[in-house]
Each structure stands twice: as C-alpha cells, then as structure tokens.
Image (spheres, rainbow, N blue to C red):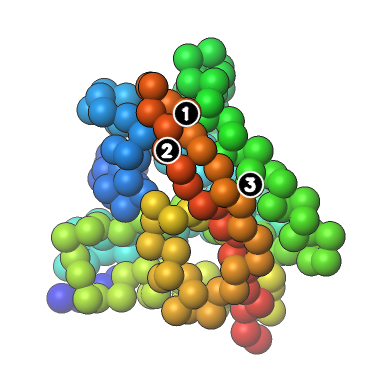
C-alpha cells in the first residue's frame, strides 16, 4: 500500500465528515443520522474556514485522512462564502436548540487562558481524522510529521477529550498542559467528559 501526501480533493469532504463522526464518537451525543451528518459537516467546514495548513493522505490513491492546522501569520486555504454561511447558521441553531453544548467551548477557552499565561503558541491543530478501516499504517503519525516538517521550531497545541484517543498525542511527544471536567446536557442526556489541552514544541 502506497501512502502519499496530496491536496485534499473536494470530492472527499464527505469521507472526512464520516471519519470525524467515527473517530470523535459524535454518536455519543446524538442518535439521529441526519443530525450526525449535519454536525460532522459543520465541524469540517469550521476547520476548513480556519485552516492555513491542510495535509491529506491517500492510500493507493484512496483518501485516508486529513489534518488541518491554523498557524499564526499564514493565509487561510479554503475559505468560501457558502461554508461560512453554513457554519454561522448551524451555530445559531445550536445556540437555540442545544444550549448545553457551549459548556465544551467554555472549557476550551478556560484552558487556553490558563495555558497562554505562560506560553505563546504559534498555532493549533484544529482537525485530525483518519479512515478507521485502515489500521497499522501510521496515517496520523505521517500527517503530524509532515506538519512538523513544514512548521519547524513552533509551539503547537490542540484540544481533545477522553471520548477521543488522546493517548495518540502523548505517544508522539505532546504534553497535557490543561484539563477540565465537564458534563454535557444534550437531548436529555448527561454526558460526563474530561477536556484536555495538549501542546508540543516542534523540532528544528
């Protein structure tokens, strides 16, 4: 199997959404397939609108994963009016119908405030998702290594939680900088989560 880094093809956006739904366990929060796909697309479009680095991997020319990062002083890659509108509308509706969801964002902001008191990060990894059916090929590691090659001697951080495989980052040199415990109240469910902020200084 040949693994190559290429530009992200627009036709693969839908697959990226599904990788995110599976890898980030969005089904913990909602049962409706329609809502899952709408939220997954919102998550992808939000990342696309912020991304300055887009690193995608293809296995034998089949899309296998993507990483988005937002680095200071670099231009955005995929901004579009329609995606921006989608994000804004979704956030408006989320604020009305899923009022308990903002506790996650508040936890992230709280962690960043504390973290930035002693750190001046150069950028954030905002999205990383791989095809869960392709195992043992180190796809996530390949994308992280490519980002570090492009962004040498930079301090990068990311948000994750215990619903995701946060240990993946620990095994690749990221250190847990902050932690917050929250309870999401969604659709009548109480979902306890532990939110994390991880960071790393890339090599020269």
Residue 204 place in picture, x, y as percent = 65, 86
Disc number placed over residue 191 in the picture, else none: 2
For the residues labelled 2 and 1, say whether their Cβ atoms are less than 8 Å apart.
yes
Q: Nearer the viewer, residue 77 or 136?
A: 136
Residue 193 place in picture, x, y as percent = 47, 47
Where residue 115 sits, quadrant-wise, is: bottom right
**153 w.r.t. 110: above or below:** below
Question: Which residue is label 3 attached to?
Answer: 108
Residue under the point 19% across and 65% down: 134
Question: Which residue is label 1 attached to?
Answer: 185
Residue under the point 69% across and 70% down: 155
Q: Residue furthest bottom?
A: 204
Q: Locate the N terminus and report the quarter of the image it occupies.
A: bottom left
Gap in angstroms between the C-alphas marked 1 and 3 = 17 Å
* Helix, strand or loop status at disc 1: strand
In the image: residue 124, left or right of residue 34: right
Residue under the point 51% across and 52% down: 194
Q: Nearer the viewer, mark 3 or mark 2?
A: 2
**Number of residues whose C-alpha sits closer than 10 Å to that of mark 2, classed few (under 14), some (14–19) or many (20 or more):** few
Res 87 visible: no
Residue 55 place in picture, x, y as percent = 44, 61
First in sequence, mark 1 or 3: give its number: 3
Q: Nearer the viewer, residue 178 or 56?
A: 178
């Amino acid at each position: 199997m040949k693994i190559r880094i290429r530009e992200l093809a627009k036709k693969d956006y839908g697959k990226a959404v599904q990788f995110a739904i599976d890898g980030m366990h969005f089904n913990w929060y909602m049962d409706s397939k329609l809502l899952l796909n709408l939220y997954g697309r919102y998550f992808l479009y939000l990342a696309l609108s912020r991304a300055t680095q887009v690193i995608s991997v293809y296995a034998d020319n089949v899309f296998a994963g993507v990483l988005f990062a937002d680095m200071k002083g670099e231009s955005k890659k995929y901004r579009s009016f329609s995606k921006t509108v989608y994000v804004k509308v979704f956030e408006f509706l989320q604020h009305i119908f899923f009022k308990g969801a903002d506790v996650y964002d508040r936890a992230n902001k709280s962690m960043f405030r504390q973290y930035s008191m002693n750190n001046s990060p150069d950028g954030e990894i905002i999205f990383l998702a791989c095809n869960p059916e392709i195992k043992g090929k180190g796809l996530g590691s390949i994308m992280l290594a490519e980002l570090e090659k492009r962004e040498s001697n930079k301090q990068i951080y990311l948000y994750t939680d215990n619903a995701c495989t946060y240990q993946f980052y620990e095994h690749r040199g990221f250190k847990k900088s902050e932690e917050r415990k929250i309870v999401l109240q969604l659709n009548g469910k109480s979902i306890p989560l532990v939110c994390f902020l991880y960071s790393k200084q890339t090599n020269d």
